[in-house]
Amino acid sequence: FRETLEETGLTLNSVKYCGIVTFVSDKWENEYMHLFLGFDYEATSLSDGDWLRGFGNSLRCLDYAIRFVKSNDELNNNKLVVVGHSWGGYAASNILKYHSDIEKVVALAPFASVKRLISGYLPKWLYIFLPLIVLADSLKCGKYSFSSNISTLKNKDNVLVLHSTDDHMVKYELNTKKLIEKNPNVKSIISNNKRHNPNYSDESIIRLTEYSSKVSKSNNKNTGLVVLWVKLRQAGYYQ
């Protein structure tokens, strides 16, 4: 989606995998372009709904999207490969709990569970409230709020996780580090200076950092709590 916007200026809303486009040249190496099925999360872009429900909703939406693929005769003869980043990374790395027949999974900067995501923004003395926060999320998203890729990916060897140790949005130590410690079968690519975008090139990270520093207005000690409040509001807890 990001590359489509950068390369064409168009916003990609809904597509399906139609095959592979091959570019052949007598001067350059062949290039291949894959066409994918995409979907909008509930209450985003073209999808119905007035709010995002909660953190578990990305997994809920992905589950329903894959159910649709499996029920569609035009799509259900293809292999399923799931790729997700951040909120989508949570969904991608937990979807095997509901669809074990997925061929491959790539998760970028995923949070392992709703509980581990929230704990990254709270001081430890507030951890006592984590079960209540997860419970509140489940009232809006159901069973999907309780998933954890640490347990989902046990004995799974078809998953690749990319994460940067300095990720300020999804804490590496609380999420992917624990995942690969508990599940050495999970393949991982760990970087050290790419923040929340482990798939970006070094040059892209430099430009993003320069831009972020220009628009940043403050670096107060409550940044973590402010970001958490923003995330909770985006998820629909505050209107």
Image: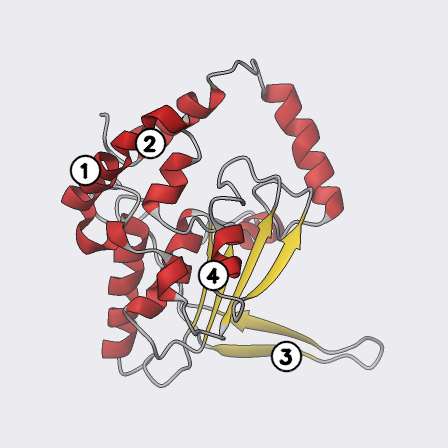
Judged left or right of residue 218, residue 74 is left
Q: Residue at x 58, y 19 (%)?
A: 216
Q: Which mark is residue 136?
A: 1
Three-letter code, disc 3: Thr
Q: How is the image coloured?
A: secondary structure
Residue at position x 28%, y 48% from top? 56
Residues under labels 4 and 1: Cα distance? 27 Å
**SS at badge 1:** helix
Residue 236 in the image: above or below residue 217: below
- Label 4 or label 3, whichever comes before in sequence order: 3
Residue under label 3, please give it: 22
Q: Earlier in the sequence, mark 2 or mark 1?
A: 2
> Pointer 2 and pointer 3: residues touching (CB < 8 Å)?
no
Number of residues whose C-alpha sits closer than 10 Å to that of mark 1, classed few (under 14), some (14–19) or many (20 or more): some
Residue drawn at point x = 52 percent, y = 71 percent: 185
At x 36%, y 32%, the residue is: 231
Q: CA distance from mark 2 to mark 4?
A: 22 Å
Q: Is residue 50 visible?
A: no
Q: Residues within 10 Å of mark 3 (few under 14, many from 20)?
A: few
Q: Crowding at label 2, few (<14), some or many (≥20) Cα neighbours within 10 Å?
A: some
Work out whether mark 4 precedes mark 1 in sequence or the reverse, and give the earlier one.
Answer: 1
Task: Report the Cα–Cα distance between label 2 and label 3.
Answer: 52 Å
- Nearest-to-viewer mark from 2 and 3: 2
Cα–Cα span, label 1 and label 3: 48 Å
- Of 52 and 100, nearer the camera is 100
Please state the horizontal and vertical placement of residue 95, each as a whole percent of the image. Answer: 34, 64
Residue type for callout 4: Lys
Which residue, given by chain and number where applicable, does mark 4 sit on? 182
- Label 2 SS: helix
